[in-house]
Amino acid sequence: MKSTVKMPKVADSVNEVFISEILVSIGGTVQAGDPLMLVETDKASVEVPSPISGTVISVLVVIDEEVSTGAPIVEIESL
């Protein structure tokens, strides 16, 4: 089953982040808790973990893109 992973809230006062590094690739497998990407706030770098295990079928963001909390970032086909 395909699931769309959305950008979680990374800090209480932060609603938008910048994508600094994408740590997965299309066709790669991830386990729940594995980091999907690294994002930057004005104060810190934060890893975004995968909420589910599966195969990455699409990456919906690019490096340096500004992304809002709740925006779709990755699609994963669950195992």
Image (cartoon, grey):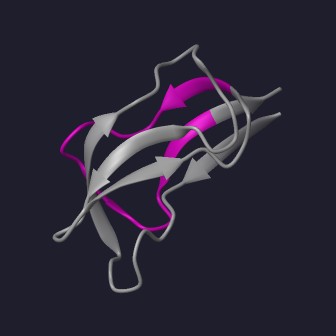
State whether residue 75 is above or below residue 79: below
State whether residue 8 is above or below residue 14: above
Q: Name the residue nearer the viewer: 23 or 67.
A: 23
Q: Residue at x 34, y 45 (%)?
A: 38
Q: Name the residue nearer the viewer: 35 or 67.
A: 35
Q: Name the residue nearer the viewer: 5 or 34.
A: 34
* Residue 45: quarter of image: bottom left
> How far across and how far down the image is residue 33, in percent?
63, 45
* Residue 56: quarter of image: top right
Q: Which residues are magenta?
A: 55-75
Q: Quadrant of the N terminus?
A: top right
Q: Quadrant of the C terminus?
A: top right
> How far across and how far down the image is residue 10, in percent?
42, 68
Q: Name the residue nearer the viewer: 31 or 17.
A: 31
Is residue 62 covered in magenta? Answer: yes
> Among all residues in the image, which is located at the extreme bottom?
13
Q: Residue at x 47, y 71 (%)?
A: 9
Left or right: 65 as drawn, with respect to 77: left
* Residue 46: quarter of image: bottom left
Is residue 18 covered in magenta? Answer: no
State whether residue 45 is above or below residue 42: above
Q: Residue at x 16, y 70 (%)?
A: 42
Q: How many marks?
A: 0
> How far across and how far down the image is residue 69, in percent?
44, 68
Q: Residue at x 50, y 40 (%)?
A: 35
> Among all residues in the image, which is located at the extreme top?
27
